[in-house]
Image (cartoon, grey):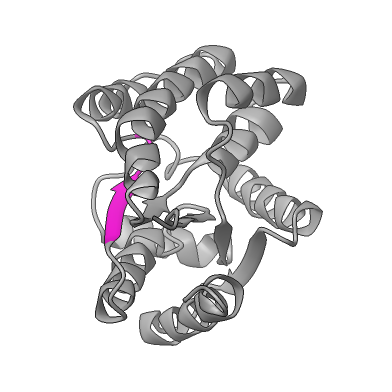
Amino acid sequence: MRRGKLITFEGGEGAGKSTQVALLAERLRAAGIEAVLTREPGGTPLAEAIRGLVLEAEPEPVTELLLFAAARAEHVTKVIRPALERGRWVVSDRFIDSTRVYQGVLGGVPHALISAIEEGSVAPTFPDLTVILDLPPAEGRKRTQARGALTRFDAADDAYHENLRRAFRDFAQSEPERCVVIDGARAPDEIADDVWSLVEARLLAGAH
């Protein structure tokens, strides 16, 4: 059986990741591909419990890294890897790049530590494609405020969100074979069309 594909969506707060995850899954299913939707932190009961804990508390960056890594290890072992082995495609709202940006670039956790933890909790299950939805922080803030209660990440200051946006762009530049930046300030259907074109070109061409 052909292994499935892992597609992850990344970006700042309010960038529209959840919407695009759902739209892509719909298109994959319409194309006859079984798709599994998931998110991070989350995806399993334990990982969802860790999600609630981290969003409510404000742990130190290394503590936060380890909590997210524990959630991810569960997620990869119990959800992502089994689905891929069964030939399903997995579409995830956030994955390793969020840790690299939030706890690494913004939290100051050394890259070497993050890489070592990835090797133990993720490898060899890395994304086949990562879509980074790029959005000006002011627009992201409007969207998060419109949807209601803000997490502590949503409520961070302007400088934090500017650094967040820059860090995601930098990672995209450093791994162009995996990461693609897409303008997230447009209508959802327009973005979804671009995402689908990308999936067709990079993952579906020659796959059947």
- The residue located at (32%, 67%) in the rendering is 19
Front-most of 64 and 151?
64
Label total for image: 0
Residue farthest toward the left in the current orientation of the protein: 45
Q: Position of residue 74 (x, y in %)?
A: 35, 25
Front-most of 154 and 5?
5
Residue farthest toward the front in the current orientation of the protein: 1
Instruction: Specify whether 52 is left or right of 143.
Output: left
Asked if 104 appears above or below 177 in the picture, the reply is: above
Tell me, yes or no, whether the highlighted magenta stretch contains residue 39: yes
Tell me, yes or no, whether the highlighted magenta stretch contains residue 23: no
Instruction: Specify whether 176 is left or right of 182.
Output: right
Whether residue 83 is visible: yes
Give the position of the N terminus as an image quadrant.
bottom left
Instruction: Specify whether 137 is left or right of 3.
Output: right
- The residue located at (44%, 25%) in the rendering is 68
Whether residue 40 is visible: no
Q: Quadrant of residue 75?
A: top left
Asked if 70 appears above or below 177 in the picture, the reply is: above
Q: Position of residue 18 (x, y in %)?
A: 33, 59
Q: Quadrant of residue 116?
A: top right
Q: Position of residue 66 (x, y in %)?
A: 50, 16
- The residue located at (35%, 19%) in the rendering is 57
Q: Position of residue 187 (x, y in %)?
A: 41, 84
Asked if 142 appears above or below 166 in the picture, the reply is: below
Front-most of 171 and 53?
171
Instruction: Specify whether 9 is left or right of 84.
Output: right
- Chief secondary structure of the magenta portion: strand
Q: Which residues are magenta?
A: 35-41
Front-most of 131 and 1?
1
- The residue located at (26%, 80%) in the rendering is 30
